[in-house]
Image: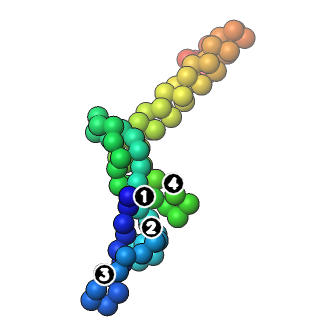
Amino acid sequence: MLRVYELRGTRYFETSENWLEQVGLGVILWEGKFEDRQDTWLRWCYQDGTVLSTGDERAEQERQRAEQAEQRTQLLADRLRAMGVDPDNL
């Protein structure tokens, strides 16, 4: 169970909101693997509940994007070769 408190004046009060207007982010309990450990984690999130990616997650997304771009480039080169065009001499 997640409990969120907000500071009002000099005291903290429990709130049902997980959105922290002061920082423009929220917090959410997230089930998943982080640093090789499957567990429930506290994660920053956007107002719609989408979690912010960690540095490792962003790196993996970029690695996948680069791999897909390489595959598309190779497919295009293969198609050009099939049409008799050498992509290395363009």
33 up-or-down from 70: above or below: below
| Furthest-bottom residue in this view | 9
Q: Amino acid at mark 3?
A: Tyr
Q: Which residue is label 4 attached to? A: 50
Comes first in the chain, label 3 or label 1: 3
The residue sitting at 42% across, 75% down in the picture is: 15
33 up-or-down from 7: above or below: above
Measuring from the top left, give residue 40's x and y in whole percent.
Answer: 35, 47
CB under 8 Å between discs 2 and 4: no
Q: Which residue is label 1 attached to? A: 28
Q: Amino acid at mark 4?
A: Thr
49 up-or-down from 87: above or below: below
Q: In front here: 62 or 49?
A: 49
Measuring from the top left, give residue 83's x and y in whole percent.
Answer: 72, 11
Q: Which residue is label 2 attached to? A: 18
Q: In front here: 11 or 86?
A: 11
Q: Quick one: SS at disc 1?
A: strand
Comes first in the chain, label 1 or label 2: 2
CB under 8 Å between discs 4 and 3: no
Q: Nearer the viewer, mark 1 or mark 4?
A: 1
Looking at the rendered image, the quarter that the C terminus falls into is top right
Comes first in the chain, label 3 or label 2: 3
